[in-house]
Image: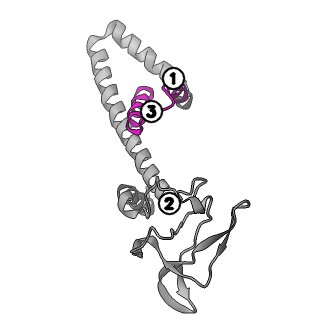
Amino acid sequence: MTWRAAWLLLLLSGGVLLAPLLAPYDPARSYREFLLAPPMRPRFLYEGALHSPFIHPITLVDRLEQRYEVAVNETRPLPWFDRERESRPAFLLGADSFGRDVLSRLLFGARLSIGLALLSTIGAVVAGACLGMWAGYRGGLPDELTMRIADFLLVLPAIYVLLVLRAALPLVMPAAAVFAMMAAIFVLIA
C-alpha cells in the first residue's frame, strides 16, 4: 500500500469516527420544503474578492417538477460556520426524496458500516479460532465435520447466504437489533 492510499484511508476513517462532529445536520431530520434538492456548491469568491466559505441558497420554483433556483444575490455560510444552521439548510451533496441531508446520512451510514465490518471480523476470527482449536483437539469426526461445513460455506456465494438469512428475520426491528443480527450473520458466513 502506498503512502497516499494510507493517508486517504486514515482521513476517511477519521471522518467516519468524527461523524457526529462533521455531519452538518441530524441524519434523520427531514426538510419537507427541500425534497430532492440538488447539491449546493461551496464557493470562496464573492464579487471578485476572496470570502470565507459560503453557498448560494436555493429556493423551490416548481414543486411538481422539483425544480430549484439558485439565489445568486444571497449568500449563507457553510453549516459549520453558521450559528443559525437550522434556519435554511445547506445541502453540499443534496437531499434525498424525504428532504434529508445526504452528506450527514453518508457519514453516519459509513460509520455504521465500518462498525459492522469491524465487529463481524473480530467475531469471525474469535469464533473460527475457538472452533478450529476445539476441532483440532478433538480430532476424528468433529474435525471432519467442521472441515466439511467450512468447505460448504466457502463454496456458497456469501451474499446469497446473507440475503436468505436476513429474509428469515422480521422486517421491522429496532436498529440495534438489526445491527446485532447482521453482525451475527456475517460472523456465521465468514
Q: Is residue 38 left or right of residue 176?
A: right
Label drawn at residue 103: 2
Q: Is residue 14 magenta?
A: no
Q: Which secondary structure type mostly characterizes the magenta part of the structure?
A: helix
Q: Secondary structure at mark 2?
A: helix
Q: Secondary structure at mark 3?
A: loop
Name the residue type under label 2.
Leu
Point out the image quarter for the N terminus. bottom left
Q: Quote the CA–CA distance across marks 3 and 1.
A: 12 Å
Q: Position of residue 176 (x, y in %)?
A: 38, 38
Q: Residues within 10 Å of mark 2 (few under 14, many from 20)?
A: many
Which of the pair 13/73 is nearer the observer? Answer: 73
Q: Secondary structure at mark 1?
A: loop
Q: In the displayed image of the protein, which residue is found farthest to the top?
A: 141
Q: Position of residue 153 (x, y in %)?
A: 48, 22
Q: Quote the CA–CA distance across marks 2 and 3.
A: 25 Å
**Which range is magenta?**
161-190
Label drawn at residue 41: none
Mark 1 and mark 2 residues within 8 Å of each other at the beta carbon: no
Label drawn at residue 168: 1
Give the residue number, with chain letter if any, for mark 3. 173
Give the vertical position of 35 relative to 128 (above or below): below
Give the vertical position of 47 relative to 160 (above or below): below
Name the residue type under label 3.
Met
Give the vertical position of 81 relative to 1 (above or below): below
Q: Position of residue 2 (x, y in %)?
A: 44, 59
Dot placed on the residue nearer the N-terminal end, 3 or 1: 1
Q: Residue at x 61, y 63 (%)?
A: 37
Q: Quadrant of residue 6?
A: bottom left
Q: Residue at x 57, y 73 (%)?
A: 41
